[in-house]
Amino acid sequence: MKYKRILLKLSGEALLGSHPYGIDPKIASVIADQVKKVVKKGVQVAIVIGGGNIFRGYQATAENSKMDRATADYMGMLATAMNALALEDAFKRDGIDARVQSAIEMPKIAEGYIRKKAIAHLEKKRVVIFAAGTGNPYFSTDTAAALRALEIHADILMKATKVDGIYDKDPEKHKDAKKIARMTHHDVVVKRLKVMDMPAITLAMENELPILVFNIFKKDSIIHAVEGKNVGSLIG
């Protein structure tokens, strides 16, 4: 394996499946099956998951200007906790030992985030799912993913999407869109590409953390990614 420890960033929308809202258990199982194959190869896996399938803070603020942004963001963090629990359940049903750690204290349902404890779980071959972002409003789960990846000394941050990498145009709208196999963090910043939020990109750039953008729904894509095969687009 090219990478021994990875941070997988999943959007909440990845759990939608064919549903317009909420969590599709079948999709959670598909993701669990992919992660299981990677864990069996000896790769340590941590996950940061978003909450956009349930509630998105900044979007709610835009739609209802009377809602306080911090309050909306905390509601979004609760949505990520719901997704983390659903993912943990899918993992355990598939025979994968998993733990949820939350940046907001929720002792009845999840461990509090402790960096050394998270690393200990990984070393014991447990999948660690980080919920509630950074625990602070105004910071996205993209930024939380970059932060956690650096804290646990992950070899790479893998951004899971429905598109196989970065393109010069929207491939769903333009048939002539060309895939960009490799680029630097600086390129992403200068071109203002919407790969991840800018705070996440700049944090990764300052700390030389590579980012792989790939399609998680392609068969064995995570395995191919950790093996270093030509999957998705690499930033770094």
Image: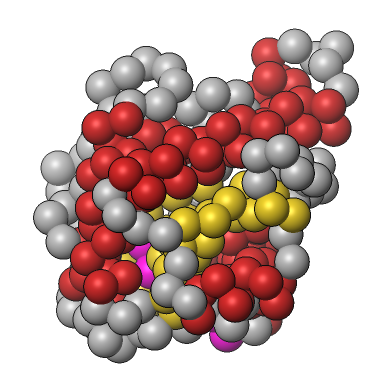
Q: Can residue 167 be seen in the rendering of this structure?
A: no
* Residue 212, magenta (yes or no): yes
Residue at 66 percent of width and 46 percent of height: 110
| Viewer-proximal residue among 93 and 231 | 93
Q: Residue 35: horizontal and vertical position, in percent?
A: 30, 60
What residue range appears in magenta?
Answer: 208-213
Residue drawn at x 75%, y 11% as measured from the top left: 64
Say which quarter of the image contains residue 36.
bottom left
Q: What's the residue at 37%, 49% (across, down)?
A: 92
Q: Which image quadrant is residue 41 in?
A: bottom left
* Nearer to the camera, 34 or 137: 34
Relative to 215, 190 lies left or right: right
In reply to whether residue 142 is colored magenta, the answer given is no
- Rendering coords of residue 91 (x, y %): 36, 49
Scheme of image coloration = secondary structure
The percent coordinates of residue 144 (x first, y second) are 65, 57
